[in-house]
Image (cartoon, rainbow, N blue to C red):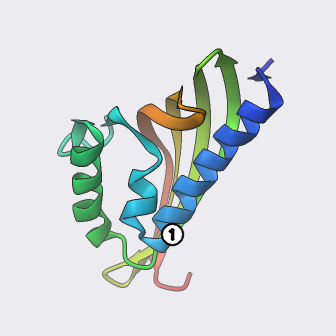
Amino acid sequence: MTFTGPFEDRLAIRELLETYADAVTQCDANAWGATWAEDAEWSLPDYPELGTTKGRAAIVAMWIEAMKAYPGIMFEAWPGSIEIAGDTATMRSYTSEVYDQDGVTMRDRGIYEDTCVKIDGSWFFKTRSFRNIHRQHAPKGC
């Protein structure tokens, strides 16, 4: 089964993912950063220039810089699976992003493989690894 564990925890992890997506769309570094554990790790293997970043502060700093290239982004995410074992969980989630860059409308879709941890009753991302699934680039508005 792809969704296992207590309903309340699965809902909290979905809300963690939704908070993350909303913070990207709102370009809210504080809200986005609050979704990560202090000792988190973010891997972007399809972006070797970014690689893997460790620690919440470094992850947020890298994200703030990277977001400059994604003006007006609309970011959506949804879970494909959530499996909970105590205070840890694994989640597979999918993303859809739309943004304009240099007169081109970019539509990117991807997949995250995540580990989440429950700390003091709240869920956080411990590890996130992102891969591209599909990219579509067209003249702005198409």
Give whichever of 137, 43 is nearer the camera. 43
Q: Is residue 123 visible?
A: yes
Q: Quadrant of the N terminus?
A: top right
| Residue at the (33%, 40%) spot, across then down | 46
Residue 54: which quarter of the image?
A: top left
Residue 24, above or below 59: below
User: Where's residue 40, x and y in %?
Assistant: 35, 33
- Give the vertical position of 38 relative to 75 (above or below): above
Q: Residue 78, image x and y in percent? A: 67, 47
**Left or right: 10 with respect to 73?**
right
Q: What residue does disc 1 label?
A: 25
Q: Nearer the viewer, residue 118 or 29?
A: 118
Q: Element under label 1?
A: helix
Q: Is residue 86 left or right of residue 72?
A: right
Q: Quadrant of the C terminus?
A: bottom right
Which x, y percent locates residue 31?
46, 60
Q: Residues within 10 Å of mark 1 (few under 14, many from 20)?
A: some
Q: Residue at x 58, y 23 (%)?
A: 90
Identify the image quadrant of residue 70. Answer: bottom left
Q: Which amino acid type is shown beneath numbered disc 1?
A: Thr
Please provide percent x and percent y for residue 17: 59, 47
Quarter where residue 30 is shown: bottom left
